[in-house]
């Protein structure tokens, strides 16, 4: 089912805000040098490196929104995001404020997306880019969650789990409760 892409999808805004807040909660869960410590050979990078990558995509989106041409290859590569968790938390707060301030009127504009390698510009929409950011974030959060657990921390069990999977799991749990209840009533 297609939706009207000229209207800002508030669920996408909410989903991205929740993802950013989940990231902040996880950063606060980390102890000592865990944000910058690698976990080789299982993970070649650090939790901070994954957060830098995610937050730079959001920054890119916000700073390129006015131009209506997105190129996530043209990121700042802010190394401080990778090694300073407090700076990353302040950046998340700024991004939350920016995402909350997105005007619904912006959804009616035409947007383009390109990559630096080919310079091909493809049509996109504000909603599609918000969906990409959410999906991209969850993908990296899955890796961050695994690293966090390897360090002995326990983030929320849904950290790094796609929204569709969360919904599916909730439905399965509800179905299982119904089956158990029906079986108990049948006895």
Image (spheres, helix red, strand yellow):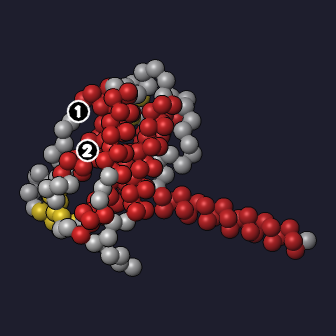
- Residue 138 visible in rendering: no
Q: Residue at x 32, y 52 (%)?
A: 101
Mark in the foreground, 2 or 1: 2
Badge 2 marks a residue whose secondary structure is helix
| Image location of residue 165, percent across then percent down | 51, 59
**Left of 174 or right of it: where is 88?**
left
The residue most toward the bottom is 1
Q: Return the x and y of residue 66 as percentages of the image width and height.
A: 17, 55
> Residue 82 at x, y = what percent?
31, 30
Mark 2 to mark 1: distance in Å?
A: 10 Å
Point out residue 41 in the picture as x, y percentages from the top left corner.
39, 31
The local crowd at label 2, few if under 14, some if 14 to 19, many if 20 or more residues have their Cα within 10 Å, is many
Q: Residues within 10 Å of mark 1 (few under 14, many from 20)?
A: few
Whether residue 149 sits left or right of residue 58 in the image: it is right
| Mark 2 lies on residue | 59
Residue 78: which disc? 1
**Residue closest to the eye, 97 or 118:** 97
Q: Which of 116 and 57 is in front in this view?
A: 57
Assign a secondary structure to mark 1: loop
- Name the residue rendered at 38%, 33% in the picture: 89
Which residue is at 39% across, 79% downward? 1
The relative height of residue 8 versus residue 143 in the rendered view (above or below) is: below
Which corner quadrant of the image does residue 187 belong to? bottom right
Among the two numbered marks 2 and 1 on one chain, the one whose residue lies closer to the N terminus: 2
Residue under the point 32% across and 36% down: 91
- Residue 23 location, quadrant: top left
């Amino acid at each position: 089912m297609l939706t009207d892409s000229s209207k800002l999808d508030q669920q996408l805004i909410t989903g991205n805000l929740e993802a950013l807040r989940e990231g902040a909660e996880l950063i606060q869960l980390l102890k000592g040098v865990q944000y910058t410590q690698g976990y080789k050979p299982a993970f070649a990078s650090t939790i901070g490196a994954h957060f830098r990558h995610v937050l730079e995509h959001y920054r890119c989106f916000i700073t390129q929104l006015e131009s209506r041409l997105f190129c996530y290859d043209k990121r700042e590569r802010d190394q401080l995001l990778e090694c300073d968790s407090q700076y990353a938390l302040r950046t998340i707060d700024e991004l939350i404020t920016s995402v909350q301030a997105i005007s619904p009127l912006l959804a009616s504009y035409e947007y383009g997306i390109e990559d630096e390698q080919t310079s091909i510009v493809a049509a996109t929409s504000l909603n599609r880019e918000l969906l990409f950011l959410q999906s991209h974030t969850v993908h990296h959060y899955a890796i961050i969650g695994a690293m966090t657990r390897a360090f002995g921390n326990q983030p929320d069990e849904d950290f790094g789990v796609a929204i569709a999977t969360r919904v599916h799991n909730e439905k399965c749990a509800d179905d299982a409760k119904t089956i158990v209840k029906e079986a108990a009533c049948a006895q």
